[in-house]
Image (cartoon, rainbow, N blue to C red):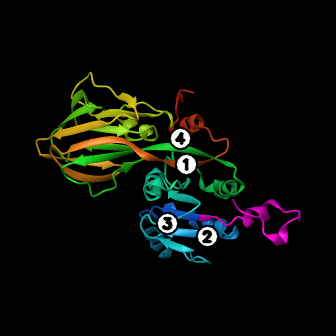
C-alpha cells in the first residue's frame, strides 16, 4: 500500500497526481530477434517515465534495445537471471515472449501483463494502441488477476539442463526424421496407454489453445483445474485427447529406434536418452496474469481464434 505524501494531504488531488504518487517498479522483457516487435518500446518507456516508475530491463533485451534506440532516461536497473523484484512484469512481444517472461517471474507472484507486438497475442492481449490506458489501469487498480496453473517435469536418470516448469505445455517428441516413438503412459501409477506416435503433449488449460489445439486437443478454460494429454500424429484411429485432474502424476517412459527423444518445455528443448522416466505434475505456484477489468476469456477466444465464425457470412 502506498501513502499520500504529507505535502498534499488535505488537498484536492487530480487522478494523475494520485497515480504518480505511487512508486511502482516495472520489469520489462521482450523479443530480441525481430526489431519491429520492439517498435512500441519508446511509447511504453515514455509512459512509465512520465509516471515516475522504476524501469528494470532484462539484460539481453536492454542490450538489444540500446543498439537501436536512445532513451532520455536510463533504466533503473538491469535484470540478470531470475533474481529481481517488481510490482509488475511487462512482456513486449507475442505469446512466446510471454512464456519467456513467465519463466523469469517463476514463483515470485509478480503479475504479468502482455503487450502484443506479435501476431496472435492470445496471452499478450494488450495492443500497442492500448499501452497508455493499460498502464494507467495498473496504477488505478482497475485490473483483475487470473491465476494460471504451471506444470513441472522430473526425470529419473538423465538430468534436465533446461527449466522444468511450463505455463503452456510439456511435450515428448521424436527427433528429426526418426521413426515414431512409443510412450508408455501411467496416471497415478495406473497404466493408461502406450502411445505409438510422433509425440505426446501434456498441456495446462492455458496451453490448450497452443500446440495441443493444433493436434486436435480441446479448448480448456483457464482455472478449471485439469491437464490434457494429446497425441501428436498417433498411429491409431482410436486415440483421442484425455483430460485428467491437475493433481494427478503422469509418468512417461519412451522407447525409440534412435534411442533418444526430445523433451520440449514451453518451447525450450533438450535431447533425452531412451528410457529416461519422466514424471509430470502440477507445480506448487501459479502465474498471475493482469487483465484489465471487463476483459472476458470468451470474447478473447472469439476475437483472437475466430471461434465460431462462419466464413460464409
Magenta includes 267? no
Contact between labelled residues 4 and 2, with CB atoms less than 8 Å apart: no
Front label number (2 vs 4): 2
- Sequence order check: which comes first, mark 1 or mark 2? 2
Q: Which one is nearer the viewer's eye here, 40 or 254?
A: 254
- Sequence order check: which comes first, mark 4 or mark 3? 3
- Sequence order check: which comes first, mark 1 or mark 4? 1
Front label number (3 vs 2): 3
Q: Residue at x 78, y 69 (%)?
A: 5
Q: Is residue 287 above or below residue 79?
A: above
Magenta includes 14? yes
Q: Is residue 281 above or below residue 114?
A: above
Residue 83, quarter of the rendered image: bottom left
- Sequence order check: which comes first, mark 2 or mark 4? 2
User: Under tag 2, what secondary structure?
Assistant: strand
In the image, is 48 to the left or to the right of 101? right
Q: Which residue is mark 3?
A: 84
Q: Residue at x 58, y 69 (%)?
A: 55
Contact between labelled residues 4 and 1, with CB atoms less than 8 Å apart: no
Front label number (4 vs 3): 3
Q: Which one is nearer the viewer's eye here, 2 or 86?
A: 2
User: Under tag 4, what secondary structure?
Assistant: helix
Front label number (1 vs 4): 1
Q: Which residue is mark 2?
A: 54
Q: Which residue is mark 4?
A: 304
Q: Which residue is mark 1?
A: 289
Q: Is residue 195 above or below residue 31?
A: above
In the image, is 112 to the left or to the right of 21? left
Region rendered in magenta: 1-25
Amino acid at each position: 500500500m502506498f501513502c499520500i505524501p504529507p505535502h498534499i494531504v488535505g488537498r484536492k488531488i487530480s487522478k494523475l497526481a494520485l497515480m504518480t504518487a505511487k512508486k511502482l517498479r516495472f520489469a520489462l522483457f521482450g523479443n530480441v530477434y525481430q526489431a519491429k516487435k520492439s517498435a512500441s518500446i519508446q511509447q511504453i518507456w515514455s509512459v512509465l517515465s512520465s509516471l515516475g516508475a522504476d524501469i528494470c530491463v532484462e539484460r539481453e533485451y536492454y542490450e538489444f534495445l540500446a543498439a537501436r534506440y536512445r532513451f532520455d532516461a536510463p533504466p533503473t536497473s538491469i535484470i540478470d537471471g531470475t533474481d529481481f523484484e517488481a510490482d509488475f512484469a511487462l512482456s513486449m512481444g507475442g505469446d512466446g515472449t510471454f512464456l519467456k517472461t513467465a519463466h523469469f517471474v517463476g514463483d515470485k507472484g509478480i503479475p504479468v501483463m502482455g503487450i502484443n507486438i506479435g501476431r496472435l497475442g492470445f496471452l499478450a492481449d494488450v495492443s500497442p494502441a492500448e499501452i497508455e490506458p493499460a498502464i494507467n489501469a495498473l496504477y488505478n487498480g482497475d485490473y483483475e488477476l487470473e491465476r494460471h496453473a504451471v506444470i513441472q517435469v522430473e526425470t529419473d536418470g538423465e538430468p534436465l539442463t533446461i527449466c522444468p516448469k511450463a505455463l503452456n505445455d510439456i511435450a515428448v517428441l521424436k527427433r528429426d526424421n526418426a521413426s515414431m516413438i512409443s510412450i508408455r503412459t501411467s496416471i497415478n501409477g495406473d497404466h493408461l496407454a502406450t502411445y505409438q506416435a510422433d509425440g505426446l503433449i501434456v498441456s495446462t488449460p492455458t496451453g490448450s489453445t497452443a500446440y495441443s489445439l493444433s493436434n486436435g486437443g480441446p479448448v480448456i478454460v483457464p482455472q478449471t483445474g485439469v491437464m490434457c494429454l494429446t497425441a501428436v500424429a498417433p498411429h491409431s484411429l482410436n486415440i483421442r485427447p484425455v483430460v485428467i485432474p491437475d493433481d494427478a502424476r503422469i509418468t512417461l517412459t519412451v522407447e525409440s529406434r534412435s534411442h533418444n527423444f526430445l523433451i520440449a518445455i514451453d518451447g525450450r528443448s533438450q535431447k533425452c536418452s531412451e528410457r529416461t522416466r519422466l514424471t509430470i505434475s502440477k507445480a506448487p505456484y501459479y502465474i498471475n496474469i493482469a487483465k484489465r477489468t471487463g476483459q472476458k476469456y470468451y470474447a478473447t477466444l472469439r476475437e483472437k481464434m475466430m471461434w465460431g465464425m462462419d466464413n460464409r457470412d
